[in-house]
Image (spheres, rainbow, N blue to C red):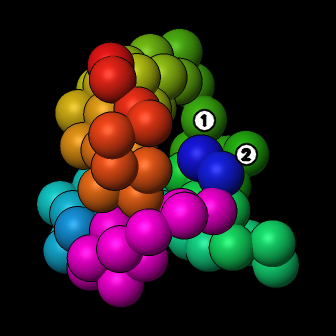
Amino acid sequence: MPAPEVRQAERYVLLLRRNLGLYGMAFAIGAEDAVYLSGRLPLSALDEAELDRIVGSTYAYVEANFRPAMRIGFGSRFRG
C-alpha cells in the first residue's frame, strides 16, 4: 500500500491494532512509508496444509484491510 497522503497516524493505528489478530504476519512500514504485509516462516514448518493456511490468511487480511486503510490515507481519492 503506498504511503498515505492524509491521516497517516489514523491509518497506522488501524493497522497496528489489527496486527494483534494476524496469523504468521504483520503490517509493517517500509523505508518509503509504504505499508507492507510481512511474514516469516521456517521452511521446516512449511507443508501443504500450512501453505494453504498462510495463503488463505494473506488473502483474507488484504481483503479486510486494504480498502479501509486506503480510504483513511487517501480520503475521497479512493473509491473502492
Distance of mark 1 from mark 2, alpha carbons? 5 Å
- What amino acid is found at the position of numbered circle 2 in the picture? Leu
Residue 8 sits inside the magenta stretch? yes
SS state under label 1: loop
Q: Residue at x 35, y 84 (%)?
A: 9
What's drawn in magenta, residue-wise? 3-13
Q: Residue at x 81, y 72 (%)?
A: 32
Residue 69: where, in percent of width, then height?
33, 50
- Local packing at callout 1 (Cα closer than 10 Å; few below 14, some 14-19, many 20+) is few
The answer to whether residue 61 is visible is no
Residue 17: where, in percent of width, then height?
19, 74
- Does 31 sit above or below residue 78? below
Q: Quadrant of residue 54?
A: top left
- Does 47 sit above or below residue 76? above
Residue 11: where, in percent of width, then height?
33, 68
Q: Residue at x 44, y 69 (%)?
A: 6
Q: Nearer the viewer, residue 24 or 46?
A: 24
Quarter of the picture containing the C terminus is: top left
Q: Residue at x 40, y 44 (%)?
A: 70
For the residues labelled 1 and 2, say whether their Cβ atoms are less than 8 Å apart.
Answer: yes
Residue named by callout 2: 43
Residue named by callout 1: 46
- What amino acid is found at the position of numbered circle 1 in the picture? Leu
Residue 47 horizontal side relative to residue 32, left or right? left
SS state under label 2: helix
Residue 23: where, in percent of width, then height?
32, 51
